[in-house]
């Protein structure tokens, strides 16, 4: 039994925590609430913590670095490794929890109960700060409960505080379905929170020599709803406000909080500068004046645009692709684009547009390597997946520390990346080019067709394994039996809302003739729509669709 947490104990915790995550990896993956074949929170946590363990293994120093004690040095190595290896939202949040622990304990000579409690407070704060809009019933709720219980223990005894934190985390995990309706409908607990509970139990085992005996989460009772948050936001708000803003990071954070209270669909994208820089601000509101005043209070807003949704015309014809001039030499003024995508055909298309392609679900370190390998001073990153957006943000901050400006355009599908790259213009100011790419991506609606991997109750009705699911902007719209018929039907539904260009990317599992069948249907039903079809080679999804 340990009275204090030293460097050797930190290393044993890292090894034990990774082993626990690996043992339960499949269980955590299965907590995914969507019946599509790529739910991988368990895998992302294992990969993230593997990077933390590898960072420790490569540095066997027994003394601290600078002001850090040996245990602080070990925790900093873990946090840095996890940051660069972070996969998905859960991995990024976990890396911030480790960072909070490391910074709180780095200079503490002896870590006992009260020191651990203070570090857990900082870890919870760092986790919440990593998320633009924290949601309860997630990993955040679990780490917050652990921190509160550690404080309430009010003890110098390390075993007492660690046990209280781990026990409270387990109870908070059991309550997550009460806090998040999607979990309740699925009959599961939060996957990221389950991973954190395993890590806290591993810490208790290192300290006490005994593994806490806890029941495993109850098996799934009701199959999950295959829905996701609508990207277009709530219909409660009538106006879209967008502007560029020159301001420092602190003022932008205050503005972000103000705008969050005025509406939804809030996106604030910086150019990579940590202290001050140029920001692209987008929000849906009813009070236009208040939104613009928030920008004036933060700094210098310009290129202000206001759109009333009721006045929006049908989408305009897409711009023709512009030739991309290769930079004379790599350096501060050179530009590049880095795109995350899976599938040989998609990679070939994106490379043809002048982009560097990184395989799907990369770590922050892999994205950072790709950004730096371009040799450019200004880089746009297109993540093509909501989970990868958080990882891209980490890579962008790391690249900025190395003198590279990086802007992340929040694309959610390869078809949006193609639309964004088509309008790229090296003659424009970099900030203006980023805005043009973001607007083009946002104007491209996307859909994906796959086979259901499990039973589920969706907004389109119940589905069973093997049913064909058509998801539009992340939400199940159609459930079918025949793949070609379902693909044609979902394109019909999308074109019912307007559109003049359809892009079809057939996947690795697509049967021969799928794209041709959809093209033939469109030629009969929508003769004036332009159709581009390519072999994408993407896994999981036989067809990806873009409508502009």
Image (cartoon, rainbow, N blue to C red):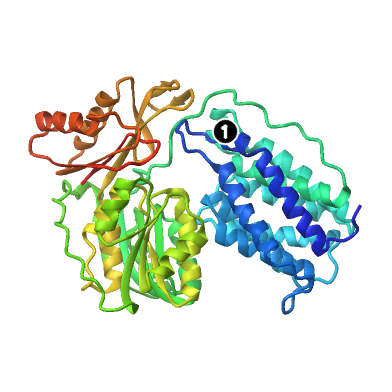
Depicted 464 relative to depicted 345: above or below: above
Image coordinates of residue 39 in percent, x first then y, are 50, 38
Would residue 487 be found to the left or right of residue 115 on screen? left
Q: Label 1, secondary structure: give it.
A: loop
Q: Residue at x 19, y 34 (%)?
A: 496
Image coordinates of residue 44 in percent, x first then y, are 56, 47
Name the residue nearer the viewer: 188 or 303: 188
Name the residue nearer the viewer: 501 or 252: 501
Other-residue count near label 1 (Cα within 10 Å), few / some / many at <14 / 14–19 / ≥20 = some
Would residue 334 be found to the left or right of residue 111 on screen? left
Depicted 18 relative to depicted 483: above or below: below
Would residue 56 be found to the left or right of residue 516 on screen? right
Q: How many marks?
A: 1
Instruction: Mark yes or no: residue 355 visible.
Output: yes
Q: Residue at x 51, y 50 (%)?
A: 88
Q: Residue at x 78, y 54 (%)?
A: 12
Would residue 361 be found to the left or right of residue 317 on screen? right
Q: What residue sits right under mark 1 in the picture? A: 30
Image coordinates of residue 280 in percent, x first then y, are 35, 66
Instruction: Mark yes or no: residue 274 visible.
Output: no
Judged from this view, the residue extending furthest toward the left is: 528
Q: Residue at x 22, y 58 (%)?
A: 422
Image coordinates of residue 269 in percent, x first then y, are 40, 64
């Amino acid at each position: 039994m340990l009275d204090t947490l030293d460097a050797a104990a930190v290393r044993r915790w890292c090894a034990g925590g990774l082993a626990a995550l690996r043992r339960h990896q499949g269980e955590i993956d299965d907590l995914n609430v969507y019946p599509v074949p790529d739910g991988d929170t368990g895998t992302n946590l294992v990969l993230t913590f593997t990077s933390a363990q590898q960072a420790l293994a490569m540095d066997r120093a027994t003394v601290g670095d600078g002001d850090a004690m040996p245990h602080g040095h070990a925790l900093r190595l873990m946090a840095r490794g996890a940051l660069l290896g972070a996969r998905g939202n859960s991995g990024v949040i976990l890396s911030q929890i480790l960072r909070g622990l490391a910074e709180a304990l780095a200079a503490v000579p002896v870590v006992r109960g009260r020191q651990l409690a203070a570090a857990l407070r900082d870890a919870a704060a760092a986790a919440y700060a990593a998320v633009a809009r924290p949601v309860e019933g997630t990993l955040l709720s679990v780490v917050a409960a652990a921190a509160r219980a550690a404080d309430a223990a009010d003890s110098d005894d390390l075993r007492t505080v660690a046990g209280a934190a781990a026990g409270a985390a387990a109870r908070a995990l059991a309550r997550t379905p009460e806090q998040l309706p999607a979990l309740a409908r699925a009959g599961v607990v939060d996957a990221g929170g389950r991973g954190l509970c395993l890590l806290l139990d591993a810490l208790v085992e290192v300290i006490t020599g005994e593994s806490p005996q806890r029941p495993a989460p109850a098996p799934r009772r009701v199959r999950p709803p295959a829905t996701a948050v609508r990207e277009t936001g709530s219909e409660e708000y009538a106006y879209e406000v967008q502007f560029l803003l020159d301001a420092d990071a602190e003022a932008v954070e205050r503005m972000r909080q103000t705008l969050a209270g005025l509406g939804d669909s809030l996106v604030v994208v910086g150019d990579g500068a940590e202290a001050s820089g140029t920001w692209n601000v987008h929000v849906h509101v009813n009070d236009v004046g208040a939104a613009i005043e928030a920008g004036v209070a933060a700094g210098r807003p310009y290129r202000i645009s206001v759109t009333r949704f009721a006045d929006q015309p049908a989408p305009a014809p897409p711009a023709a692709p512009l030739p991309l001039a290769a930079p004379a030499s790599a350096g501060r003024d050179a530009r590049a684009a880095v795109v995350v995508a899976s599938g040989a055909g998609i990679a070939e298309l994106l490379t043809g547009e002048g982009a560097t392609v990184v395989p799907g679900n990369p770590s922050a370190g892999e994205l950072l390597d790709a950004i730096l390998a371009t040799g450019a001073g200004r880089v746009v990153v297109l993540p093509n997946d909501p989970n990868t957006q958080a990882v891209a943000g980490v890579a962008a901050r790391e690249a900025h520390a190395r003198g590279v400006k990086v802007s992340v355009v929040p694309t959610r599908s390869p078809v949006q990346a193609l639309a964004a790259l088509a309008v790229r213009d090296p003659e424009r100011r970099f900030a203006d080019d980023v805005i043009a790419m973001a607007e083009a991506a946002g104007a491209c609606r996307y859909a994906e067709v796959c086979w259901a991997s499990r039973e589920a109750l969706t907004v389109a009705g119940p589905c069973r394994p093997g049913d064909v699911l058509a998801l539009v902007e992340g939400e199940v719209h159609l459930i079918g039996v025949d793949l070609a018929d379902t693909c044609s039907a979902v394109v019909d539904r999308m074109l019912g809302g307007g559109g003049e260009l359809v892009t079809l990317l057939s996947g690795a599992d697509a049967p021969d003739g799928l794209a041709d069948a959809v093209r033939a249907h469109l030629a009969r039903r929508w003769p004036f729509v332009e159709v581009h079809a390519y072999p994408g080679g993407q896994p999981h999804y036989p067809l990806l669709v873009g409508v502009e």
